[in-house]
Amino acid sequence: MVNMTAGNEREADDLFKEFRETSITEFFRKNRAHLGYSGKLRSLTTIVHEIVTNALDACEEAGILPEIQIGIDSLGVEHYRVSGSDNGPGIPIKHVPDVFGKMLAGTKFHRNVQLRGQQGIGVAGVTLFSQITTGKPIKVKTSTGNGKVHEIELMIDITKNKADILKHEEYSEYWRGTGIGIEVKGVKFNLGERGPFEYLRRTAIANPHTRITFIDPEGRKTIFDRSSEKIPKPPVPVRAHPKGLEVDEIINMAKATKARKANSFLVTSLSRMSNAKVKEIQEYVSFDLDKNPRKLTWSECEEIINAIEKTKFLAPSMEGLEAIGEEHVRNAVLNILDPEFEAVLTRPPKVHSGGIPFQVEVAIAVGGQAGRNVGEGTRYELMRFANKAPLLFDAGGCAITKAVSSVDWKRYGIKDFENSPVTVFVNVLSTHIPYISAGKQSIAEDRKIMKEVRFALMEVGRRFQLYHSRKRRALEKEAKKQILLRYGSELASALAQLSNKNEEKIRKALQKLVDERITGMDLEEEEANESEMETMLEGESEDDSEIPEADFTTEEE
Amino acid sequence: MVNMTAGNEREADDLFKEFRETSITEFFRKNRAHLGYSGKLRSLTTIVHEIVTNALDACEEAGILPEIQIGIDSLGVEHYRVSGSDNGPGIPIKHVPDVFGKMLAGTKFHRNVQLRGQQGIGVAGVTLFSQITTGKPIKVKTSTGNGKVHEIELMIDITKNKADILKHEEYSEYWRGTGIGIEVKGVKFNLGERGPFEYLRRTAIANPHTRITFIDPEGRKTIFDRSSEKIPKPPVPVRAHPKGLEVDEIINMAKATKARKANSFLVTSLSRMSNAKVKEIQEYVSFDLDKNPRKLTWSECEEIINAIEKTKFLAPSMEGLEAIGEEHVRNAVLNILDPEFEAVLTRPPKVHSGGIPFQVEVAIAVGGQAGRNVGEGTRYELMRFANKAPLLFDAGGCAITKAVSSVDWKRYGIKDFENSPVTVFVNVLSTHIPYISAGKQSIAEDRKIMKEVRFALMEVGRRFQLYHSRKRRALEKEAKKQILLRYGSELASALAQLSNKNEEKIRKALQKLVDERITGMDLEEEEANESEMETMLEGESEDDSEIPEADFTTEEE
């Protein structure tokens, strides 16, 4: 037994006098860095990011070609008004308070759907940031196109995580869309590579169907026009893929199902789960899958998971994933960077933990305007995207950055990668991106995502190497040919005098000879080179031996 | 007006059918990586971290010398039981459900107090992780020493963020403390530098008054014994420092104050705010500070903030910050690393954003067991701590790591820093550490924190340089002396024969001469060297010109 009254000890009841519950809004008010509000430039970019991603998601779901206006007005030192509006479907008036004035409320969290937003926090974070820096409410104007327009001003009641409506006006007008206006302090605008302008430029690259008009604090207007009129397929919620599912998830799904039997529950709730597959699973488990799914026990679900591990399934369907597409990425890259060489690749979809499908698209551009100008020269530039939204911050810890660094670029003929005029473009698509924090600027080091990005980059690297060595050989060949032709021309003249034959005829014959020889050399060399390259690349295809182990110890050790 | 029925457009009401609220527990269940549950090893270390930090915080607040037991039993493949117990103050029974079964509930969030925990999420996260990987509840045993012991089993009702009590037994026994047991799957134990063993070893280093007993899955018992019997001062909540306060915070504090006048509100609510300082502020603001603080408007509070900017205040008081202390850090470093050279430094406290005091302690150890063994050699090792809790993950994005890399170690005589036998120890103390995410393994790039860490490291770097150059000179001196003495000995013998005097006497005289000369040289050289070094280091003291700007663009651009 311990002496309970010794020294200056304090008792538990005394210590717990301070016990309190905190609202999610209080939490993020104190930890605003988790939402991306850390630093003056970053905070402003975060606001633009939240407005734009919400607008794009709404338009995409509604099947509308997006038109987005963003304006940033300077109101004083580190004091700005940010306004945004879209031609989206609008927000039904009864949901407006929750969308802008409540955290963890939204349409996306509960669905496996590929959208930029996924948490129901972002835009309420904008309201919060506005009110804690200026004490001013967010102004919202919205209409679903039903002839009624609503104008609302609201703040968040921080301790209750609930909207506090300060003003609500309704009037008749046929218009559709959503506009918001906020006033913020302690932020800074610039045109640098992490600022709102660059954010919008990259958004335009990854969303070629979008038209964005931007007016910066100096009144300059930029229009990022659309290069495609094709509305992307509205994202569809997908059922989870069996591989990567967890027991806990099966139990939760089983509680919510309308199916009466476990076997039909599995078929209706999971993708790629056919009746034939359920029969295979039945052979591995010790109980009858005819039972009520709501009565599945933990250990029975564990048996199902183990059976799934032993069973083969088709790869996840593409239906839930809508890539930008190689053609659009190529157009955007050519348009903006006008490179000497470019390669674009979309990998087939894979599954990461939780049975969640994901897909990787990459592009590489070399020469031309590719790379990043840094005064004394050009450096390599990495454009990261998640579900087509640009990631401008927290590059260091991001799975994409680590995958890019893991590639041995020298092997593909890029000697000093860091200091070369190269732009690497990577977009990760998923119905659930495993971000590191609620600020959503960095993808967690998921081994499977890193592998996919790496393989895609290795493939475009190989294509560059092919181009590079062909180009080198073409240059060498041309040089040889010029030398031979020069001598040939002199030789023709000498031969013509000696033999008294037509000089022009002799020159043509010699030229033909040179052409044949050079082409012959070329073919031989090409063959030799290709097989050399194959040997060189052998054993490299899709193994991950080069990814430094240290990069993964945090993940799957 | 837009055509509302064109093509395949979907309407807002349809899209918002899916609108739902999410509980904070559902949020973290889906985004468990934010809490540190990503990767098998990391998840296990996170569990140990949550148990240990809660135990240490409780003991520290109660003024108890901590005794902590941690056990990890293997129950199968990637399947473990983790148990932990402490001799802390115990938890009053009415708070047990909320402590373990509700997120965002706790005693620490609302106080400015230097503790390891600060959010009220961590240990409920352990319950959540246990139940989603094994379906099993957390088992808790606790008593406040009042003769009644409670044993409880609970899970979290995820949609309600509320405890679901499965079992509660009460019996009579005089015992005090808290023990918990959980069962988890999908995790992995190892003895590596990011595993539970290393976590506990580093905890022991930074908490020399703590005794930790650890039993690993193979039954091996390790006792990290205390090297000090001194109980650290219980942390005291501190009032905010005026510098770095925000308008929003003053408004909130003014609403909660019991003071009747704005001037007395400022004096009682803020640290370092005296009546004299309030008088200075009165001169800058356009209204009378005699007014009711609850009636302060936003623009009046802005005036107060602007006035504070123009006013000088004493640095924040140390009272809220309890460093490990140079002596304890030195003992720990000597004990564990037995280095050839070590230097320890505690910087004076500073204020980061939000008027929050923080302080930095650093140590450097060179040679001996310092550094990290990596098979082919020794590499530099960085031990990061926040409020004395080890940070083992997410090193890449951490302010501490960036500050260490920003130092030009060559300048201090460490040529190949990355590959040298050097251990750098950094502990950041604060009543609110700005972590990057709820997982609390990485400190956000706060410019002020990075500067402090950098300056502290530059200072210990200088001390190493002094040692290093003295050592080099001492070696050179000794070599010269040996040469002179050798010749002296031969000379003495020759002189003795020539002069017929006592050889021994002559040798002694020569030796005295050599000693005098060498010492003389030494003094001259030392002076020359010191002034050379001063010139070399000039202009370097505490400027941040060397911190690469890129490191800061995310923060304060």
Image (cartoon, coloured by chain):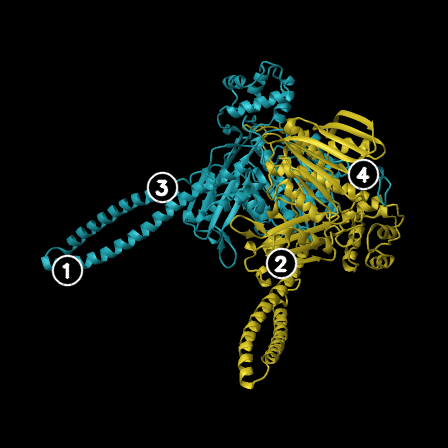
Chain colours: A yellow, B cyan
Dot 2 corresponds to which residue?
Answer: A340
Q: Name the chain letter of the residue that bears numbered label 2.
A: A
Q: What's the distance in space between the residues labelled 3 and 2, CA to CA?
A: 52 Å
Q: How crowded is mark 4: few (under 14 residues within 10 Å), some or many (20 or more)?
A: many
Q: What's the distance in space between the residues labelled 3 and 4, CA to CA?
A: 68 Å
Q: What's the distance in space between the residues labelled 1 and 2, CA to CA?
A: 83 Å
Q: What's the distance in space between the residues labelled 1 and 3, CA to CA?
A: 46 Å
Which residue lies at the image location 48% right of the left edge and 41% below the top edge? B454
Callout 1: helix, strand or loop?
helix
Q: What's the distance in space between the residues labelled 1 and 4, CA to CA?
A: 109 Å
Badge 2 amino acid: Glu
Dot 3 corresponds to which residue?
Answer: B534
Query: Which numbered disc flags the more N-terminal residue, 4 or 2?
Result: 4
Callout 2: helix, strand or loop?
loop
Q: Position of residue A341 (x, y in %)?
A: 63, 59
Query: Which numbered disc flags the more N-terminal residue, 1 or 3?
Result: 1
Q: Where is residue A128 in the image (x, y as percent from the top left)?
A: 68, 31
